[in-house]
Amino acid sequence: MQNKFLSKLVIGLTFFTLLLVQGYSYSQITSTSPFSSYGLGQRDGLDHGIYAGLGTTTITYFDSTNLNFFNPASYNTIGKGQPIFSTGVSSRLSWYSDSLTQNFSKAILLNHFAMGFSFAKHFGFTFGLKPFSRRGYQFSTKSLLVSDSMGYSYTGSGSTSEVFIGVSSNILKLKSSQLSIGGNFGYVFGSLINEKRSYLLGTNSGGIEQKVLKIKGVHYELGMFFRHNINKNNSFIFSAVVEPNQNINASQTDDLFYASSFGKISLYNKLDSSSTSGSVSITPSSTFGFCYIFGYKGFEKSKMAKDSELSFHASYNITNYKDNPTKFSGVNLYSNYINTNKLTIGVQYIPNKMFFDHTKKSNPFEILRYRVGYYQYNLPMTINSKTLNDKGITLGIGIPLKGQKSLSSINFGLTYGKRGDGTNLGLNEKYIGANLSIVFAPASFERWFVKRKLD
């Protein structure tokens, strides 16, 4: 009884802490990248604590210990009677530089909240909230006129989120093979703002052009995986997730102001305003992944063999911006965009997978999950006809919570990367991402949806 009380107390305090973090994160800038000024903003850079350690490979790693909403076919792999609550926080420190300036910025955000469980033997269900896109940037330029100098400042802000439900089912379940399909179906909502200010240098007044894009509509993605157990210790998984071309309702307002003082909104004088309603077409995207799992008897201690596991993960994503550009009411939101591809590679090592069976004899380092990875991809935009690339390495660690033999865990993931055109003249970014995810699950003796038998 005491252990049960302590378990619920820990979960309650953790949720309270996360609510405080959520309130803090909403007051912060969720993106600091100048690249987020394009289209729907930035859709990457907020990595899950688990998958951040695997080179951001997301669609191939799932089992009863985690909730993978990146591949909606995985929900039926959650343990029976053991629902999973998952949440996490992402932060990113960025150092920007070009031939003239250097700048440092940071961003933090609660990156998801979700719950999933399996039911009716072959089905799984999930619901939650996650970010969809983000915008956040600020930079300025100036130009020389005949007798005066003009200054221009550009800022962006806002974000869109998605509340979603997901369902998956086995369409093939044999002794050694499993084929599952699933889908996420959500509602996207939020606003993205671009603002340009024009003024004479040395003054605090001028013109303001503001564009606000509001999005609210249905969004979906589909996934599948096929798992085959070669033998007792070896298996492989092939996964695929597709985000089809689809339209989301949107509206845009264009306002033009004159401000006698930029610091006081009450002194803004609206000169012109127009609005447009329509839809945003989402560029289709496809991701394919492969995982090989190798289990073996590890080192022996106290005459006890450890069930160790080594898994290799890889994925490849293609987003077809060139042939299917994202548009709003027929107008291309991405000017001169190119198709993108992303390669991710990750490795996970578990020294002692069955530590519950000999908890007292396992040292703390044997129960951890060690992760390392690498990724590279090209951004869809080009600057001065040069392709922008993003490359990085990752490290991660998973810490199972042994108390009461639950599937709960705390996961940390670190990323270090570089983004730019590879020259000293263009805009380049060096960044460090720190990601935390927490998984809650009931103890083995507190399983849900299980009929109790009375003696």
Image: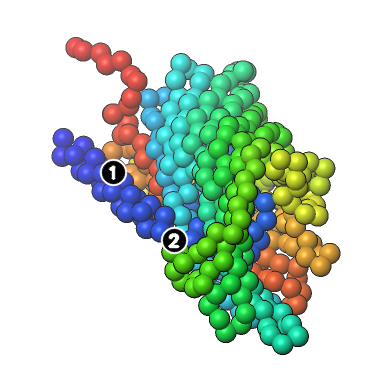
- Which mark is in front, 1 or 2? 2
Residue lying at the far left in this picture: please name it: 2
Visible in this render: residue 42? no
Image height of 299 relative to 137, above or below: above
Measured as percent of width and height from the top left, residue 196 is found at 62, 65
Question: Which secondary structure, mark 1?
Answer: helix
Residue at 81% over, 67% down: 384
Residue where numbered disc 2 is placed: 28
**As rendered, which of 379 and 187 lies closer to the eye?**
187
Query: Which numbered disc flags the more N-terminal residue, 1 or 2?
Result: 1
**As rendered, which of 326 and 181 lies closer to the eye?**
326
Q: Residues within 10 Å of mark 2 (few under 14, many from 20)?
A: few
Report which quarter residue 199 is drawn in: bottom right
Residue at 47% over, 17% down: 121
Measured as percent of width and height from the top left, residue 352 is found at 45, 45
Image height of 89 relative to 154, above or below: above
**As rendered, which of 195 and 399 lies closer to the eye?**
195
Report which quarter residue 380 is drawn in: bottom right
Measured as percent of width and height from the top left, residue 169 is found at 56, 21
- Quarter the N terminus occupies: top left
Q: Residues within 10 Å of mark 1 (few under 14, many from 20)?
A: few
Residue at 78% over, 61% down: 382
Give the residue type that dot 2 points to.
Answer: Gln
**As rendered, which of 249 and 67 lies closer to the eye?**
249
Visible in this render: residue 187? yes
Residue where numbered disc 1 is placed: 11
Measured as percent of width and height from the top left, residue 418 is found at 66, 67
The answer for how far apart the CA atoms under marks 1 and 2 are is 26 Å
Give the residue type that dot 1 points to.
Answer: Ile
Image height of 30 relative to 307, above or below: below
Question: Which secondary structure, mark 2?
Answer: loop
